[in-house]
Image (cartoon, rainbow, N blue to C red):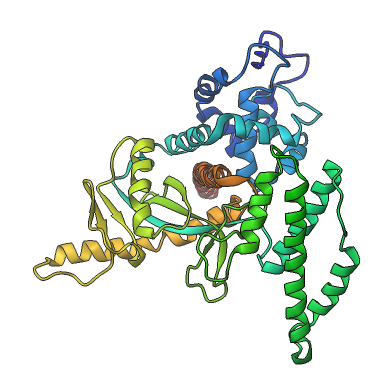
């Protein structure tokens, strides 16, 4: 049901947040700068007119922003909201509330309700908050890997998970199972434990084959006993694909609960393979605002550029004039009206002025690397806990939006400290002049 509007005529007998909180706090300033009515107009039609009243839309949007601003989980942001007055004021509260705002699971339902388009609206508002800084004509684009919250995949782990899931399906449906293999798997685990020892390699490989055989046996037994229209048949098809895949196959399954995960090799010495999806980040060249954040699977970097530029055009309202990229984007010099600048030897006849301009742009291109690191480590893109391909895109957009909001908060904080420093200098100078005048008298 649609949320009920809060009465504003009577605020209670207690003092309001406007009287209690510091007006210089970045979250207090940000609460007044965000256009909350945009989210009300966009998300209110998604609610029914019947049923239990929902939580206020501003509250739920603010919780999503604060979660990625402060790098917290759903449970932590709900818990800390009840302890932080600035969080509550940012969420639209007029007085301090002692209890939690909602259950942590309600954030999951709200993300599913508004979808990727709703999260993109939050990201668009973060660009608008930055004003003219987000309207620059020259941008930098680079890709990174957003890792999924899965364990490092091995065949043995997948086979054992298949066995566990098959056992649970049989128990849930009340199906007969010839053997549980509990003690057999325990003995096979002992044989697999010390596989690096020369004397145990043969035993370990034999145990690996036996675990795979047991997994296939349970899958076939379930397939015979399940009803024709059972909801578990899609899971069995996934299990069969895992059991049949080879080492060099394309489109392999690396996780049973996240089958869309890709194995991406980025040439890193310390981490040769990363399991997740590819994320493209577009960053203004001089002002430093993220104006594009889009998720891909495992495409070649040059093939992601057109989609990234199209997203920037939709969010900012105009096409960038130039985009500076690294050598991983080789192959395209123009995409529409946008000039693609890739580091390469200058052609004959290039003027000194043009060479200097390109060199400065290529040096500036490296500025996006620490930005990606901050988005990952500070705003929850280093490990994605959201489910599915939609969850991948949502996490990228929210992380980029949090970076833009944090940029403006730091800017306001820096402006206030600069003003305070100037005032202290003026007061110090006035005190020095007064003391000099008294000494002359």
Q: Nearer the viewer, residue 422 or 441?
A: 422
Between residue 432 and residue 230, name the one nearer to us.
230
Q: Residue at x 76, y 80 (%)?
A: 204
Is residue 84 among what the camera can see?
A: no
In the displayed orientation, state which residue is furthest to the bottom.
198
Q: Where, by quadrant of the figure, is residue 174 drawn?
A: top right
Residue shown at the point (71%, 9%) measured from the top left = 10
- Can residue 97 be seen by looking at this rendering? yes
Q: Residue 314 location, x and y as percent? A: 36, 36
**Please, is residue 269 above or below residue 82 in the view?**
below
Q: Tell me where residue 252 appears, x and y as whole percent.
A: 56, 61
Compared to residue 354, the image places residue 42 above or below, namely above
Rendering coords of residue 253 (x, y %): 60, 59
Q: Looking at the image, which is closer to me, 31 or 110?
A: 110
Q: In this view, which residue lies farthest toward the front?
A: 224
Q: Residue furthest right?
A: 183
Q: For residue 276, which quarter of the picture?
A: bottom right
């Amino acid at each position: 049901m649609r949320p009920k509007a809060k009465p504003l005529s009577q605020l209670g007998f207690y003092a309001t947040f406007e009287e209690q909180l510091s007006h210089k706090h970045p979250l207090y300033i940000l609460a007044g700068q965000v256009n909350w009515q945009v989210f009300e107009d966009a998300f209110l039609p998604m609610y029914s007119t019947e049923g239990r009243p929902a939580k206020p839309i501003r509250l739920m949007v603010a919780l999503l922003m604060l979660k990625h601003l402060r790098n917290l989980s759903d449970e932590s942001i709900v818990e800390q909201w009840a302890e932080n007055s600035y969080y509550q004021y940012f969420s639209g509260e007029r007085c301090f509330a002692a209890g939690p705002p909602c259950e942590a699971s309600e954030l999951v339902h709200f993300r599913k309700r508004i979808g990727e388009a709703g999260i993109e609206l939050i990201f668009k508002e973060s660009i608008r908050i930055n004003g003219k800084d987000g309207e620059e004509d020259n941008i930098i684009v680079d890709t990174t890997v957003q890792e999924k919250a899965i364990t490092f995949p091995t065949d043995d782990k997948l086979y054992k998970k298949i066995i566990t899931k098959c056992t649970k399906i049989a128990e849930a449906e009340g199906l007969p199972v010839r053997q549980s293999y509990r003690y057999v798997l325990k003995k096979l685990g002992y044989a697999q434990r010390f596989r690096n020892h020369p004397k145990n390699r043969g035993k370990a490989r034999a145990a690996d084959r036996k675990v795979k055989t047991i997994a296939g046996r349970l899958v076939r037994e379930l397939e015979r006993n399940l009803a024709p229209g059972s909801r578990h048949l899609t899971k069995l098809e996934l299990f069969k694909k895992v059991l049949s895949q080879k080492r060099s196959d394309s489109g392999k399954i690396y996780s049973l609960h996240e089958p869309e995960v890709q194995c991406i090799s980025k040439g890193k010495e310390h981490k040769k393979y990363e399991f997740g999806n590819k994320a493209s980040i577009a960053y203004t060249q001089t002002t430093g605002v993220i104006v594009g954040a889009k998720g891909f699977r495992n495409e070649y970097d040059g093939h992601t550029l057109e989609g990234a530029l199209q997203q920037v055009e939709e969010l900012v309202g105009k096409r960038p004039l130039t985009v500076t990229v690294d050598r991983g984007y080789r192959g395209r010099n123009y995409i529409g009206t946008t000039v693609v600048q890739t580091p390469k030897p200058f052609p004959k006849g290039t003027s000194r002025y043009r060479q200097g301009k390109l060199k400065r742009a290529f040096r500036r291109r490296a500025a996006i690397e620490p930005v990606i690191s901050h988005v990952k480590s500070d705003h929850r893109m280093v490990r994605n806990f959201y489910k599915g391909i939609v969850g991948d895109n949502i996490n990228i957009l929210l992380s980029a939006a949090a970076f833009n909001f944090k940029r403006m908060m730091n800017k306001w904080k820096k402006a206030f400290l600069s003003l305070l420093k100037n005032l202290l200098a003026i007061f110090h100078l006035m005190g020095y002049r007064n003391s000099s005048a008294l000494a002359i008298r």
